[in-house]
Image (tube, rainbow, N blue to C red):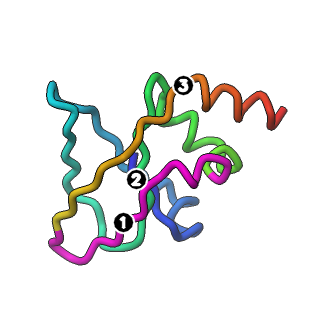
Amino acid sequence: MVVPEDPDRIAASRFWTTGLDGSGHFMLNGVEPGKYRLFALAGVEPWTIQQNFSLLKAIADRGVQLELDEGAKATAQVEITPSEEITRVIQEQE
């Protein structure tokens, strides 16, 4: 999941998601230029994050920062955040 760093763009639901191929690689097209955080989430539906900005803030350190220019390509390695960690964060927020 790619999430904008800019809160106004987050509010506008500017999220991009994709899955992994058999080799654990992914590709996203059509991402607008800007600053982002890239997350790898296992067993979590993207809407769970999109609808809970406090959850997004709580896991921000798990994301990798990206800055994309017009027409740029980027490569990044991201540690997968397991669903158990997301569940724990949600329970702590309740």
Does the magenta segment cover residue 63?
yes
Q: Which of the marked residues, 3 or 1, is nearer the chain's N terminus?
A: 1
**Span shown in magenta:** 57-72
Q: Which of the marked residues, 3 or 2, is nearer the chain's N terminus?
A: 2
Would you name the residue on which mark 1 appears?
66
Would you name the residue on which mark 2 appears?
38
Dot 3, how many residues are within 10 Å of its Cα: few (below 14), some (14-19), or many (20+)? Answer: some
Q: Residue at x 53, y 70 (%)?
A: 6
Q: Which of the marked residues, 1 or 2, is nearer the chain's N terminus?
A: 2
Q: Which numbered disc covers residue 8? A: none
Dot 2, how many residues are within 10 Å of its Cα: few (below 14), some (14-19), or many (20+)? Answer: many
Q: Nearer the viewer, residue 83 or 31?
A: 83
Would you name the residue on which mark 3 appears?
83
Check if mark 1's residue and mark 2's residue have beta carbons within 8 Å.
Answer: yes
Q: Quadrant of the C terminus?
A: top right
Disc 1 marks a residue whose amino acid type is Leu
